[in-house]
Amino acid sequence: MTGAGIRQSLMSSVAFVRARLISFVAVVSLAVFVSPVLLQAQAKKPTTLSEIVAYTGADREKILIAGAKAEGKVVWYTSLAGSSYKELAQGFEKKYPGIKVDVYRAASNELMARITAEAKARQYLVDTIETTLPLLKSLREDGLLAVYTSPHLAKYPTHAKESVGNGLYYWGVNRESFIGVGYNPNLIPPSAVPKNFNGLLHPQLKGKMGLTTSETGVRIMGAILKFKGEEFARKLKAQDISLHSISGRAMADLAISGEVPISPSIFRDHAMESKGKGAPIDWVPMEGVPTNAGATAIIYQAPHPHAAMLMADFILSPDGQKILENLEFGSPSKDFGFKRWYPEAGLNTDQYDKEATKWQKALRELGRK
């Protein structure tokens, strides 16, 4: 999925949302969530969403648990794949008996379509969302995110939380996936394993390298252009790289099978998980590592506000982070010894779309199909 693909397929719906909601919701959001709430929320028990998300009293967790149990459930939308979202939901339900997690898991573009449709119909179902930054930026621009605070966010670095001031945030990054070079050590000798992007030009790698054309490949192409430039990309073309319309997970499987012995578009967590099970695969970072960041946000007009906030707290808490860490996800609060690069950092949705389109074009021109 690319940012451009999402925006093109949903242009009419988003236009409606912006026309109907930004003029109302965004203005109301600003009026609701600014400092008066912070002053008033501590003086009384919170009841509305705007009060609940800003409350920092000593009895905060007690109030959230009692309110969430009365609400009975939390509706959670996520783009987490595999067993990760199931384990988080189970962990939450185990810690908070009596509060059910209704999960809708889908790719980011499908989440965008669903949330936009709900907003258009003014039938809000989702409470808490966990997904990638391009989608969250789009939802924020359309006035569909609430702002909130969480005691756990204090431990997160500044770049990993989207601040609006006064101790409130649109989201906090709860997991990172790192894109780098995965390879089959039975087929790639140690002398040919790249230590940086220049290493991809090693003569022994010619004809053995593949790239996925999914968003994973697009983002690593963006890193190549950012850190090495267009001239390097032209040199890389001579390596006879094959292109594959598959996911990053599937590309890791091709490296394991030996069909594509090495690829710069493999996620660290996929490689390490498989390596831990005895599969012939290893992973190395380049000098700039494209980082897919997943973050937690709360939807404006969440129908179960106490449960929405409690779910966000859990994902960002040490309990939620431990579950994700056990699944080989990275955390923004940890140093992994390489330089992270967030491709969407500093860009609004339209700007990111343009960059992603440029990277996608360069990727198509790079390889053979």
Image (spheres, rainbow, N blue to C red):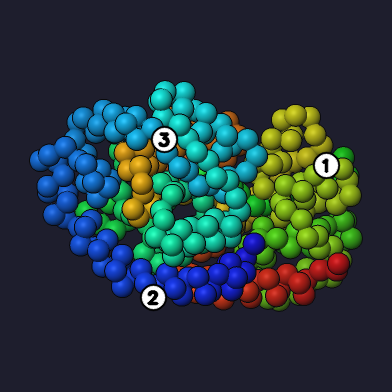
Give the x, y percent position of residue 158.
Answer: 36, 52
Helix, strand or loop at disc 3? Answer: strand
**Which of disc 1 and disc 3 is earlier in sequence?**
3
Determine which of the numbered discs, if any, sits on residue 19 in the image: 2
Left or right position of 28 against 208? left
Q: Residue at x 55, y 69 (%)?
A: 10
* CA separation in Å, label 2 and label 1: 49 Å
Left or right position of 297 against 238? left
Helix, strand or loop at disc 1? Answer: helix
Amino acid tagged 1: Ile
Amino acid tagged 2: Ala
Give the x, y percent position of residue 212.
Answer: 75, 59
Which of these two is toward me, 345 or 142?
Answer: 142
- Kindly tell me whether residue 228 is visible in this rendering: no
Residue tagged 3:
73
Q: Residue at x 21, y 42 (%)?
A: 47
Residue tagged 1:
256
Left or right position of 365 against 337? right
Amino acid tagged 3: Lys
